[in-house]
Image (cartoon, grey):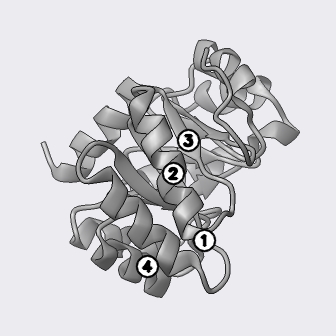
């Protein structure tokens, strides 16, 4: 089993990817310590603005092997490479970018590309992606997941985009491999 297969299995076992809000590096570190303290082991840091590198560094340093750290919203292979070299475990993109997928595979990292249609999901699976993000999932609800899984039962789908913790169980029951939940600023809400 490759490292990216192991990462995918760990994410599926955890069921939830906690997507952090766009906060300072210090707030990111505090948030990760809080999540680890609650037994949460998969966290993603959003890409945005000049503080992204600082937030990624804070996340990787804080997690120190206690949690998987990913970067969400990556739109190009250059950003993915910088994040990988900083020590992240996985990259999440809002769409299928084969350059980023190939780069992640080269470095033994997991890439979770975004897709919306069955065609896009199939392209991601055929590109060797173990997990495929279904986004923006909140616009369509769990019925979209069932519709895509119908012809593509082999696809391990991870709904993302506007999903809160309180909605995660509905997605898991609908067949999601895992769910990316967005955390609001402030204390982490009670888990399901």
Q: Is residue 92 visible?
A: no
In the image, taking residue 89 as reference, residue 29 lies left or right, namely right
Density class for disc 2 (Cα within 10 Å; few <14, some 14-19, many ≥20) is some
Density class for disc 1 (Cα within 10 Å; few <14, some 14-19, many ≥20) is many
Of mark 3 and mark 2, the one earlier in the sequence is 3
The x, y position of residue 75, in whole percent, is 59, 76
Density class for disc 3 (Cα within 10 Å; few <14, some 14-19, many ≥20) is many
Disc sitting over residue 18 in the figure: 3
Residue under label 1: 47
Of mark 3 and mark 4, the one earlier in the sequence is 3
Q: Is residue 98 visible?
A: yes
Residue under label 4: 99
Disc 2 to disc 4: CB gap under 8 Å: no
| Mark 3 vs mark 2: in front | 2
Numbered disc 3: secondary structure? strand
Measure how far apart labels 3 and 2 are at the Cα level.
Answer: 14 Å
């Amino acid at each position: 089993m490759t490292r990216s297969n192991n990462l995918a299995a760990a994410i599926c076992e955890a069921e939830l990817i906690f997507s952090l809000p766009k906060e300072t590096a210090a707030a990111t570190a505090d948030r990760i310590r809080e999540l680890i303290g609650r037994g949460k082991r998969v966290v993603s840091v959003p890409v945005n603005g000049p503080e992204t590198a600082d937030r990624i560094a804070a996340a990787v340093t804080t997690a120190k092997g206690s949690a998987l750290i990913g970067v969400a919203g990556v739109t190009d292979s250059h950003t993915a490479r910088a994040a990988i070299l900083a020590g992240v475990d996985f990259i999440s993109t809002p769409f299928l970018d084969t350059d980023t997928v190939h780069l992640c595979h080269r470095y033994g990292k997991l890439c979770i590309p975004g897709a919306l249609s069955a065609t896009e999901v199939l392209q991601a699976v055929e590109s060797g992606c173990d997990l495929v993000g279904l986004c923006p999932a909140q616009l369509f609800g769990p019925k979209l997941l069932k519709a895509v899984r119908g012809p593509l039962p082999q696809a391990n789908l991870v709904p993302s985009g506007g999903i809160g913790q309180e909605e995660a169980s509905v997605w898991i029951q609908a067949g999601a491999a895992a769910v990316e939940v967005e955390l609001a600023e402030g204390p982490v809400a009670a888990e399901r």
